[in-house]
Image (spheres, rainbow, N blue to C red):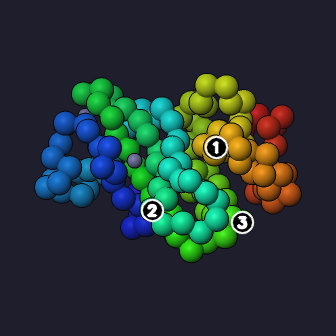
Amino acid sequence: MISSGERKCSQLLCTCIDWKNDDLTMQVNHLMNYFDFTDFELKYTTLEPEENRRLCKVGRCRICHKDLCIGKELPGQTKSDELLTEVYRWMFQMWNPSHDRLLDGADCFSDMFLSVFHESDQEFVSEWLNAKARNVSPACEEGL
Ligand SMILES: [Zn+2]
Ligand SMILES: [Zn+2]
């Protein structure tokens, strides 16, 4: 579901409706019904405080087959711990296991979460995940 903190992205290329002018309800309906999930993308350079970070759920329109994107600006003044929490929560909320597939190479949600970070950050994120998220989401082996 799209709420006020989330924004449609500049990568929104689907041509089925006019994303600048059409009714918001229509846009939300279109995203809910025709969004074919392909990827999560996190745009950042560092896990330290930084402006203009963005997290996107990227997909493809089932009708016109062009890109769709639901994105969220991440707060600039957050430490790595809060940032990871924010990214984790949003992805968990936006990913629908009954409907969205897992990304290639991911066996579970945690794998997908890890995969949005730069390779050089993954060890740190993985440790964070082990320490913090155990009680937030089921472990990989439990099949989520
Ligand atoms: Zn986007
Ligand atoms: Zn479309």
Give the amino acid at mark 1: His
Of the numbered discs 1 and 3, the one sitting upstream in the chain is 3
* Among the 4 quarters of the image, the one containing residue 73: bottom left
Secondary element at tag 2: loop
Secondary element at tag 3: helix
Give the percent coordinates (x, y) of residue 21. Answer: 13, 55
Q: Name the quarter where the N terminus is drawn.
A: bottom left
Q: How far apart are marks 3 and 2 (CA)?
A: 18 Å
Q: Which residue is drawn at 46% across and 48% down?
A: 56
Q: Which residue is drawn at 41% across and 36% down?
A: 59
Q: Is residue 2 left or right of residue 48?
A: left
As drawn, 97 above or below 24? above
Q: Which mark is drawn over residue 52?
A: 2
Is residue 127 in sight in this rendering? yes
Q: Residue at x 42, y 53 (%)?
A: 71
Secondary element at tag 1: loop
As drawn, 91 above or below 6? above
* Among the 4 quarters of the image, the one containing residue 31: top left
Is residue 89 in sight in this rendering? no
Q: Nearer the viewer, mark 3 or mark 2?
A: 2
As drawn, 80 above or below 28? below
Give the amino acid at mark 2: Asn
Give the percent coordinates (x, y) of residue 112. Answer: 65, 39
Q: Name the residue under label 3.
A: 81
Circle 2 crowding by C-alpha within 10 Å: few under 14, some 14–19, many from 20: few
Give the percent coordinates (x, y) of residue 81. Answer: 72, 66
Give the percent coordinates (x, y) of residue 138. Answer: 79, 46
| Circle 3/circle 2 CB separation < 8 Å | no
Q: Name the quarter where the C terminus is drawn.
A: top right
Q: Mark 1 points at which residue?
A: 118
